[in-house]
């Protein structure tokens, strides 16, 4: 059975991803992990997550994917032993020393080779298999046909990215941040310099500006959306389908994970995959995206249409308005927690781990003082509400308005 692997930047997000259908989550600890700006997990957090995941037949992978300099190696053995004692299912690492050291220490978790190695052919995958590695995360630069050929010849499991951010350089190895900000991307400090806006001048140092002064140059890639390629990946034998985004919100994870879960379940059950069904899934993904998306390398070498050279805006989606905290009580009241401005009179949509997106209208709202506010605009405020429709603890409520084009 294929694995749906989701990112998580903190404990709440990890639990959300599991609740909404992820078979496994990957997280970063407070040592030897990239994404230094994520709310990385303490050892106690990791232990709690492992208990939560295993009770729901899910797995926990921990990134130990820093490219360590000499001074970074102190404490490695202790950290690996701690992860093993916590019961994590796998580590994802880029350094051969870290991968081999975990084996020497007798750690029980699996060892997965990070995408930072840009493994894009079966010979490389099989090299890692001979070193005793349990899985290789393929580079994002693989086409669908290359993934198919690699899986046919691979002697160990493969993992492929299906959704999320794309670097303008090779997977996870960009050094643009190092040069422009002295923040080492391979040690967790990426400043995402590729997403900045630039004024462009000739290399000869003249002051004749080549870019439009009113529309600075951008060189970032569109985000990856591989929803159309999932059936082919499953058929090819990819072991794990990976979503990128440890910095993303719980709402983003709930939306994206549940959408891919629907598709994977449909494929595995033999459901007919109609164009209408794919359109529904793509429309659902649109509700969580704040950047343009495309197929990346999956349909072949991407051209200019996969790049964001033009002026664009990255917008934070404001559709997520409330989190459902309880089931319906004997009087019909349901506790919800406000996350963004909510007008009780507007049309809303609810979705949850066991609820497909469905329109609802709040019939009544009452705050903690027994008042019935016209507008709810205090984030994290808990209120009671009534509506005619499905309810599930952990479900999310959002506006039905279309996201502004990027």
Image: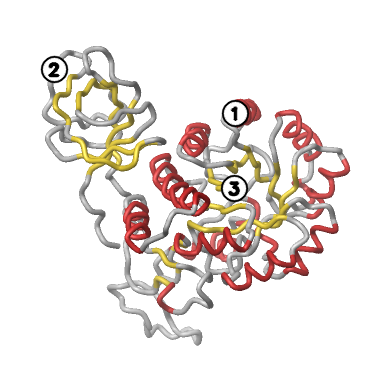
- Residues at marks 3 and 1, CA–CA distance in whole angstroms: 23 Å
Q: Residue furthest right?
A: 104
Residue 214 location (% of width, % of height) = 27, 73
* Residue at x 56% of width, y 58% of height: 161
Q: Name above or below for residue 155 compared with residue 260.
A: below
Would you identify the image quadrant in which residue 60 lies?
top right
Q: Earlier in the sequence, mark 3 or mark 2?
A: 3
Q: Secondary structure at mark 2?
A: loop
In which quadrant of the rendered view does residue 358 lie?
A: top left
Q: Which residue is drawn at the image coordinates 88% and 43% (left, top)?
A: 104
From the viewer's side, name the closer residue of 104 and 136.
Answer: 136
Q: Kindly indicate whether the residue at mark 1 contacts the one at mark 3 (C-beta within 8 angstroms).
A: no
Q: Secondary structure at mark 3?
A: strand
- Compared with 38, 93 (above or below) is below
Q: Which mark is residue 45?
A: 1
Q: Which residue is mark 3?
A: 3
Residue 146, picture quadrant: bottom right
Residue occupied by mark 2: 371
């Amino acid at each position: 059975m294929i694995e749906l692997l989701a990112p998580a930047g903190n404990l709440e997000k990890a639990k959300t991803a599991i609740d909404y259908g992820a078979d496994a989550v990957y997280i970063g600890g407070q040592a030897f992990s990239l994404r230094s700006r994520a709310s990385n997990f303490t050892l106690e957090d990791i232990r709690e997550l492992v208990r939560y995941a295993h009770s729901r037949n899910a797995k926990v992978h921990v990134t130990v994917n820093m490219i360590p300099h000499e001074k970074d190696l102190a404490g490695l053995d202790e950290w690996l032993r701690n992860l093993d004692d916590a019961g994590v299912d796998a580590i994802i690492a880029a350094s051969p020393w870290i991968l081999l050291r975990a084996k020497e220490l007798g750690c029980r978790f699996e060892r997965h080779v990070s995408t930072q190695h840009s493994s894009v052919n079966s010979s490389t995958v099989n090299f890692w298999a001979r070193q005793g590695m349990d899985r290789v995360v393929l580079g994002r630069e693989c086409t669908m046909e290359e993934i198919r050929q690699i899986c046919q010849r691979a002697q160990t499991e493969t993992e492929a990215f299906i959704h999320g951010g794309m670097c303008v350089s090779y997977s996870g190895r960009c050094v643009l941040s190092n040069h422009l900000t002295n923040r080492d991307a391979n040690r967790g400090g990426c400043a995402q310099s590729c997403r900045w806006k630039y004024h462009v001048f000739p290399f000869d140092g003249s002051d004749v500006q080549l870019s439009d002064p009113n529309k600075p140059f951008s060189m970032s890639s569109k985000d990856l959306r591989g929803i159309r390629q999932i059936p082919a990946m499953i058929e090819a034998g990819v072991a794990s389908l990976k979503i990128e985004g440890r910095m993303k919100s719980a709402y983003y994870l709930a939306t994206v994970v549940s959408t891919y879960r629907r598709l994977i379940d449909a494929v595995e059950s033999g459901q007919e995959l109609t164009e209408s069904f794919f359109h529904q899934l793509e429309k659902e993904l649109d509700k969580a995206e704040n950047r343009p998306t495309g197929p990346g390398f999956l349909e072949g070498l991407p051209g200019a249409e996969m790049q964001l050279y033009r002026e664009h805006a990255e917008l934070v989606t404001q559709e997520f308005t409330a989190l459902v905290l309880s089931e319906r009580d004997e009087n019909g009241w349901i506790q919800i927690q406000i996350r963004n401005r909510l007008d009780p009179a507007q049309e809303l949509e609810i979705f949850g781990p066991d609820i497909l997106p469905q329109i609802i209208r709040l019939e009544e709202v009452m705050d903690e003082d027994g008042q019935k506010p016209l507008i709810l605009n205090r984030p994290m405020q808990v209120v009671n509400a009534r509506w005619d429709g499905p309810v599930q603890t952990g479900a999310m409520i959002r506006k039905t308005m279309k996201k502004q084009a990027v």
